[in-house]
Amino acid sequence: MKFSQFRRNHNRSLRSQAPAWIGIAIAFYAFISIGIAEGGIGVLLPSILETFNLTPATVTFLFISQIVGYVFAAFSSSLISSRLGLAPMLLMAAVSLTTALILYGLAPTWLVMVTIGTLLGLSIGLIDASINTYMVSEQQEPKWIGLLHAFYGVGALLGPAIATTLLLLGLNWRQVYFVIASLVALLVVGVGWIIITHYSPMLVRTAASEPHIFANLRLALKTPIVLVSSLFLLVSVGTEASLGNWAYTVQQVSRGFPAATAGYSISAMWLGFTIGRVMLGVLVNRLGAVRLVNGSLALLTIGLVTWWLLPGQWVSLPLIGFAIAAIFPTTIWLMPQRVPAAVVPAAIGFVTSVASLGAAIIPTTIGWVANRAGLESIPVLILLLAIALAMLHRWLTKQHVSYDVNQRV
């Protein structure tokens, strides 16, 4: 009895001593982790193509395999977090992601690697949903959600740089995946510490009862602005992923740039992306969220036209990265203003997980088209995605005004 009392007192002491910034730091590193995991594949893709004797069309099955995981995450994230709490869900996802990356490096056949993609998709979908829910619930200011997604940019910048450097040092693509897995494993350690020390902010459950979870999810699925936001973010994330997955191949295979030049040019794109997300809070406060996204889409279009028509210059990729940076986090930040408070966790879990589908569907579709039309069709296809984003954003803007005409957006 005395021991039990001592343990309860000890746990309360740990909770009181735990600094408030720890949860934020874990959230930031979680996004660095998924940024590295997703960002590195673009540089490794030519090596994977060669190892398994693939074409730009057949390699897209790696992206397709992630869809099942993303879909499961979209419909289960709010249920899992309500049953377990955010930190246990995050721990489960971090362990799964580390395992998937190790298995990528060990995969003896292409079929095995494709199968593992489902686990990868599930892991990233759950991490994305849990961290976005935590940040929106705890910190409503745009600077926090902007910084969160800036750290995804840090990871996406580091992924190609790490992969390029390790390949230049003589490691093969399988060994690079082992290195990436070791970096993600640090997230497992951090989240494990949160659970052991009972760090309460990340142990909360997002809903009180299962009927409420399903009711809120059903309501979210019946809300047009949630569905269109999901499609908007799917295209946005798909655009990011298409650039991350295919820009290196365009630069190195199609345009003949040296491998180091091509690899570090992709890191430059993610550097622009990271700068854009670090500046998000300032830009939202000065321009308003809607005008910021309008400007971002215009800048994205200019960058894509330049990348397509002037392939030898160095400005377009960093410009594209900067332009696309604000779109996803600004849309997430606006979600609590667009839907009832009770629906926010289900809506965010759904839209972020559906958005992750874009990382599989859109690069896959682009790969199929490029297999027939050539790699130089990729900049044009991504330009069409930017136009689609502008159309969807226009609808969301009108719908948002009808929900809350007094909110400065």
Image: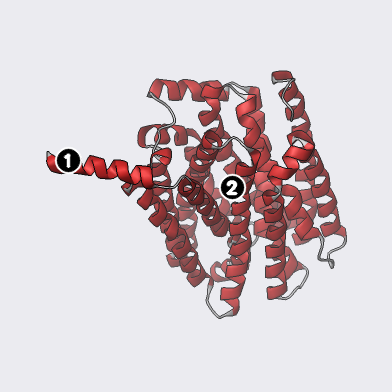
**Residue flagged by tag 2: what amino acid is it?**
Leu
Of labels 1 and 2, earlier in sequence is 1
The image position of residue 175, as x and y in percent, is: 48, 72
Image quadrant of residue 318?
A: bottom right
Residue to which mark 1 is pinned: 4
Please say which color scheme the image uses.
secondary structure
Image quadrant of residue 103?
A: bottom left
Front of the two marks 1 and 2: 1
Q: Residue at x 56, y 37 (%)?
A: 139
Q: Residue at x 39, y 53 (%)?
A: 95
Locate residue 149 relative to residue 262 in the image: left or right.
left
User: Which of the two residues, 116 or 155, is positioned nearer the viewer here?
Assistant: 155
Q: Are marks 1 and 2 in contact (CB under 8 Å)?
A: no
User: Which of the two residues, 271 or 253, is positioned nearer the viewer here?
Assistant: 271
Whether residue 56 is visible to the viewer of this picture, yes or no, is yes
Q: Residue at x 38, y 39 (%)?
A: 200
Identify whether 242 is placed above or below 284: below
Residue at the bottom extreme of this rendering: 170
Locate residue 74 relative to residue 268 in the image: left or right.
left
The image position of residue 167, as x and y in percent, is: 58, 75
Identify whether 403 is placed above or below 308: above
Residue to which mark 2 is pinned: 148
Q: In terms of secondary structure, where does tag 1 sit?
A: helix
Locate residue 396 relative to residue 67 in the image: left or right.
right
Q: In terms of secondary structure, where does tag 2 sit?
A: helix
CA gap, disc 1 and disc 2: 38 Å
User: Which of the two residues, 18 or 335, is positioned nearer the viewer here?
Assistant: 18
Locate residue 90 relative to residue 218 in the image: left or right.
left
**Residue flagged by tag 1: what amino acid is it?**
Ser
Identify whether 311 is placed above or below 69: below
Disc ID at residue 221: none
Q: How many marks?
A: 2
